[in-house]
Image (cartoon, helix red, strand yellow):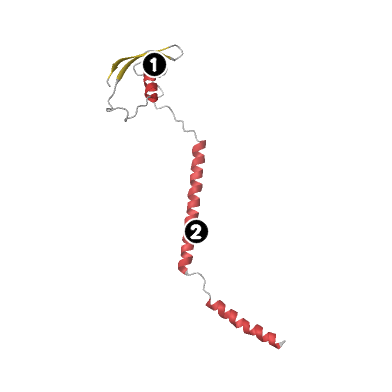
Amino acid sequence: MTVSKKKETAKEPKKAAKKETEKGPSDADIADRIAAMQKKQQSRQEIEDLKKKLAALATADTRGEDAAPDAPIGMPDGTGDQVGPSHLAWLQAYLKQQWAFSKYQAERLDLEAEVHIVYDEKGRLVDYKFLEKSG
C-alpha cells in the first residue's frame, strides 16, 4: 500500500508542473477574437436593420400624390376630354417596341421608311404599303 501512495504523490508534482508550463491564448489572440466577434455582431445587426427597412418598405404605401393633380389627362395637343394617348402615338410606341433590326443587317443605321398601314376595327393588320424607303 505504501508503494501506491508513493506513485500518487509522485504524479501530483508532475501535474502541477504541467499546469505552470501551459499558456493560455496571448493578449493579441484574445484581441483578435474579440474584434472578430464584434465584427460578426455588427454584420448581424446590419442585416437585422436591413430586414426591418425592407419590411417597412413592403408595408408602406409608396404611391404619393400626383405630381400635378389638376393636369389634364391625355395628349398635350388633344382637344376635348379624350383620355389616354392618341392613336398615332400609341401605334408609334407599339411599333417601336416590336421593332428589331440588328446593326449587322445593314451597312448604315440611319434608315427610315414611310408606311401606310391599315387595321380593321379589332386591331388586326389588314394592309400595308411602303410610301418611301431610305435603304
> What residue lies at 56% left-to-right and 78% top-to-bottom?
18
The answer to which of 42 and 114 lies nearer the viewer is 114
Q: Which mark is residue 29?
A: none
Horizontally, residue 133 falls left or right of residue 60, namely left
The answer to which of 40 and 111 lies nearer the viewer is 111
Q: Is residue 28 visible?
A: yes
Residue 115 placement: quadrant? top left
Residue 87 higher or lower than 41, as above or below: above
User: Do callouts 2 and 1 mark residues in contact (Cβ within 8 Å)?
Assistant: no
Residue 94 higher or lower than 48, as above or below: above
Identify which amino acid the numbered label 1 is placed on: His
Secondary structure, mark 1, is: helix
Identify which amino acid the numbered label 2 is placed on: Met
Q: Position of residue 10 (x, y in %)?
A: 63, 84
Secondary structure, mark 2, is: helix
Q: Residue furthest right?
A: 1
Q: Residues within 10 Å of mark 2 (few under 14, many from 20)?
A: few
Q: Residue furthest bottom?
A: 2
Question: In terms of sequence position, does the residue under pointer 2 or pointer 1 come before the other?
Answer: 2
Tell me the quarter of the image containing the N terminus.
Answer: bottom right
Residue 99 higher or lower than 18, as above or below: above
Q: Is residue 117 visible?
A: no
Residue 117 placement: quadrant? top left
Q: Residues within 10 Å of mark 1 (few under 14, many from 20)?
A: few
Q: Which mark is residue 37?
A: 2
> What residue lies at 48% left-to-right and 53% top-to-bottom?
42
Number of dots carrying numbers: 2
Residue that label 1 marks: 87
Q: Position of residue 118 (x, y in %)?
A: 39, 12
Q: Position of residue 135 (x, y in %)?
A: 28, 22
The residues tagged by marks 2 and 1 sit, at their Cα atoms, a distance apart of 64 Å
